[in-house]
Amino acid sequence: MAALGWLTPRRRSATARSVLAGEAAAEAARRSSADAALAEEAGQADGAHPEPAEQLPDFPVFGDERAAAFFDLDNTVMQGAAIYHLSKGLYKRKFFQRRELARFAWQQAWFRLAGVEDPDHMQDVRDSALSIVKGHRVAELMSISDEIYDEYMAGRIWAGTRALAQAHLDAGQQVWLVTAAPVETATIIARRLGLTGALGTVAESVDGVYTGRLVGEPLHGPAKAEAVRALAAAEGFDLARCAAYSDSHNDIPMLSLVGHPHAINPDAKLRRHARERGWRLRDYRTGRKAAKVGIPAAAGVGALAGGTAAAVALHRRRR
C-alpha cells in the first residue's frame, strides 16, 4: 500500500468494471427492496420511528413519483465508515484476529485525519473486508449486520440528514442509500432507517457462500453514478427531478447526475465545487471539526439536468 499515494486522490472516469458494479448494485437493491415490500405486506417489517422532517422550501415536490433521493452513507447519513463499524462487530464475534482489527483501526484513523476517501485507500479497506467474509454465508452476515447496527451504528446517525431523508419519504418519494459498504449491510441500515433500499458493493457468492471476490468493483466514485443511472432506468425516475446527498468530492459524478445535488458535511473540495455551482450545502457537524472546515450557509438549489438514463439490461445479460 502506497501511503503517500493516499494524499493525492486521482480523478477516475467510469470503466467497464464501474458499470458492472453499478448494474449489480442496482439489481441487488431492487431485489432487496422487493423482498422488503413483501415482508411489510405480511406484517414482518420493522416499524421505523423517525423524528419530524426538516422543512425545506418547495422541495421535495409532494407526489412526484418520478423523483427519488440518493444518499451517500459514510459521514453523510452516519458518522464514520460503515465498513469499520462492521469490522468491529465481526471482530467481537471472532471472525478475524487482533492484528486485522488494528489494520482497520489504522485505516479509519487515516480517514479521519485526511478527511477524504482516496480510491486506493478505500480499495484496501474493501480487500480487507472481503478476506474476512470469504467462506461465510450471506445469511450469516445479514443476521450479524442487524445486531451490529444496534451496537455501533444506531447512535451515529446524523439527525439532520435523517430528517432530509424523511422529507423525501413524506413527499411520497423513494429514498436509497448509495454506498461502498457491502450491500447486505447497507440494506440492513436502510431498512432500520425506514428507507426504500440500498445500492452497495456486491460481493460474489456461490450457493449462498462468499467467494472473496467482488462483482465489478467497490461501489465508489463513478460506480455510484452508474448504479444510480441503472436504478433510475429500471424504476422510471427522471434524474433531472431527483436529489443526491454526499459529503465527499469523490461523489461528484453521482451529484452531477441529478437535478438537485446537495453537499452534506462536505470535504474541502466538495464544498468549493458546490459553492461554484450553487448547490445546496448543509453541515451538521459541531465543535472543533466543524470549526476546522467552516459551516457554509445554505445555497440555492442548482438546476443541473441529469440527462437521459441509458437503457440498461440489469444483471440478466450476464446470467
Image (cartoon, rainbow, N blue to C red):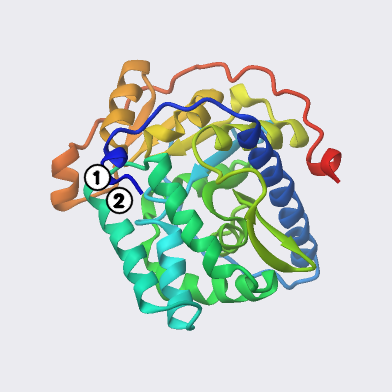
For residue 114, above or below residue 13: below
- Identify the residue at horizontal 33%, vertical 30% (top origin): 270
For disc 1, the neighbor class at 10 Å (few under 14, some 14 to 19, many from 20) is: few
Relative placement, left or right, of 126 versus 115 is right
For residue 306, above or below residue 290: above
Tell me residue 273's x, y (percent): 34, 22
Q: Is residue 147 visible?
A: yes
SS class of the residue under badge 2? helix
Q: Is residue 154 visible?
A: no
Tell me residue 80's x, y (percent): 35, 57
Total marks placed: 2
C-alpha gap between disc 1 and disc 2 = 5 Å
Quarter of the view holding residue 7:
top left
Quarter of the view holding residue 291:
top left
> What type is the residue that disc 1 sits on?
Ala
Tell me residue 5's x, y (percent): 31, 38
Relative placement, left or right, of 206 versus 266 is right
Quarter of the view holding residue 205:
bottom right
- Identify the residue at horizontal 24%, vertical 45% (top origin): 114
Q: In the rendered image, which residue does mark 1 sit on?
A: 114
- Identify the residue at horizontal 42%, vertical 26% (top origin): 11
Q: In the rendered image, which residue does mark 2 sit on?
A: 111
Tell me residue 103's x, y (percent): 34, 64
- Identify the residue at horizontal 20%, vertical 51% (top origin): 286
> What type is the residue that disc 2 sits on?
Phe
In depth, the one of 245 and 224 nearer the eye is: 224
Q: Marks 1 and 2: CB-CB under 8 Å?
A: yes
